[in-house]
Image (cartoon, grey):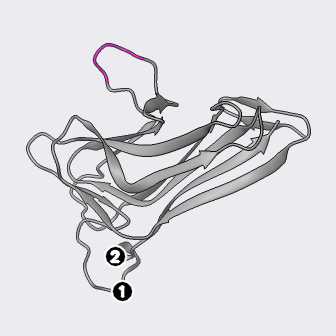
Amino acid sequence: MAIVFASGTLSGPTKLLQAQETVISSQFTDSSSSNTWRSMSGFSRSITTIGSNSKLLITVNLGIVKPQGNTVGFKFQRNGSDVAIGNADGNRPRMMFRQTDQGTDTSHSDGISFSFMDQPGGGAGSSYTYQLYFYHENSGTLWVNRNQTYSNTSGAEQGVTTSTIQILEIAA
């Protein structure tokens, strides 16, 4: 059976060697300086591969992402080096994906999911860290797992969510 991903095809008999997950159920707020990459608190995971030619399917799910007024970019690093980012092009920041504010609506927000395949090398220990690059001109805040207004009401738009990082090691 072949599994087709954007980064290539994994074919032949496959076997799931291990599965790891980090669940982040707390609300995360960031309002520090813009235009710099920084790690998101709690958004990291380490894994040591079992197989010599294994691939890792890494999935991140952010329950709610609300950047106030502008845009936030995201990327993963493996052992301090960027993985699965866009090609270099001038001074543009290289990232995995980005989220843009929905305007003046402070109650409604989007969730984001992203997956990619990585092949770190057999038996190697790898530490994956999720980073953000927040852009705001004067001031702004990023909320994760909650919306901007965070009112204590029963409307679905006020709900709190969880975010996850999942790593599946697949033998080729």
Question: Tag 2, which secondary structure?
Answer: helix
Magenta-colored segment: predominant secondary structure: loop
Query: Which dot marks residue 104?
Result: none
Horizontally, residue 56 falls left or right of residue 65, namely right
Q: Which residues are magenta?
A: 88-92
91 is within the stretch colored magenta: yes
Horizontally, residue 104 falls left or right of residue 2, namely left
Asked where in the image residue 120 lies, by quadrant, the reply is top right
Query: Which residue occupies 73% across, 53% down?
Result: 18
Query: Which dot marks residue 158?
Result: 2
Query: Which residue occupies 48% across, 35% down?
Result: 79
Q: Is residue 35 above or below residue 104?
A: above
Q: Quadrant of the N terminus?
A: top right
Question: Considering depth in this image, is 169 or 108 the residue closer to the camera?
Answer: 169
Report the label total.
Answer: 2
Instruction: Measure how far apart labels 2 and 1 are at the Cα level.
Output: 7 Å
Q: Quadrant of the C terminus?
A: top right
10 Å neighbourhood of mark 1: few (<14), some, or many (≥20)?
few
User: Furthest residue to the top?
Assistant: 90
Question: Tag 1, which secondary structure?
Answer: loop
Q: Are marks 2 and 1 in contact (CB under 8 Å)?
A: yes
Query: Which residue occupies 23% across, 44% down?
Result: 70
Which residue is denoted by mark 1 in the rendering? Answer: 154
Give the image location of residue 41, x and y in percent: 34, 56
Question: Considering depth in this image, is 85 or 77 the residue closer to the camera?
Answer: 77
129 is within the stretch colored magenta: no
Q: Is residue 39 above or below residue 42?
A: above
Task: Name which residue type carries label 2.
Answer: Gln
